[in-house]
Amino acid sequence: MGETARLKAEFGDRLTFWGAIDTRHVLPYGALHDVRTQVQRRINDLGPVGGYVVCPVHNIQPEVLPENVVAMYDEAYEFGRYPP
């Protein structure tokens, strides 16, 4: 079990998670695929039954390519929908 999945299992009934998209490695230096994969993993780990806001861990720094920011939010929009 990954760290974010463990946190959700342990605290998810009492907390809402905010962020968890890596601003140190993935957003500034990752390929589009890396960004999209991390968004999917965080949604899988932290999103079940609600309680997760997809966004970066911290402020988006100048070295982050605009394409990676767009990929992060596009993937969240496409992958992160709750069932009707």
Image (spheres, rainbow, N blue to C red):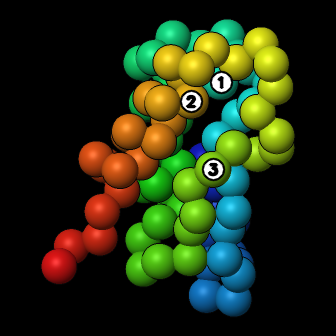
**34 in relation to 71, above or below:** above
Residue type beneath disc 3: Cys
- Tag 3, which secondary structure? strand
In the image, 60 versus 36, the foreground residue is 60
Whether label 2 touches label 1, CB < 8 Å: yes
> What is the residue that sits farthest to the left in this orientation?
84
Residue visible at 67% across and 67% down?
Answer: 17
Locate the C terminus by quadrant.
bottom left
Q: Which mark is residue 27?
A: 1
Q: CA distance from mark 3 to mark 1?
A: 11 Å
Q: CA distance from mark 2 to mark 3?
A: 10 Å
Left or right of 10, for residue 61: right
Q: Earlier in the sequence, mark 2 or mark 3?
A: 3
Q: Residues within 10 Å of mark 2 (few under 14, many from 20)?
A: some
**52 in relation to 23, above or below:** below
Q: Earlier in the sequence, mark 2 or mark 1?
A: 1
Q: Earlier in the sequence, mark 3 or mark 1?
A: 1
Q: Residues within 10 Å of mark 1 (few under 14, many from 20)?
A: many
Position of residue 55 measured from the top left corner of the image (x, y, whole percent):
63, 50
Q: CA distance from mark 2 to mark 1?
A: 7 Å
Q: Which mark is residue 69?
A: 2
Residue 53 in sight here: yes
Q: Which residue is mark 3?
A: 55
Residue 26 in sight here: no
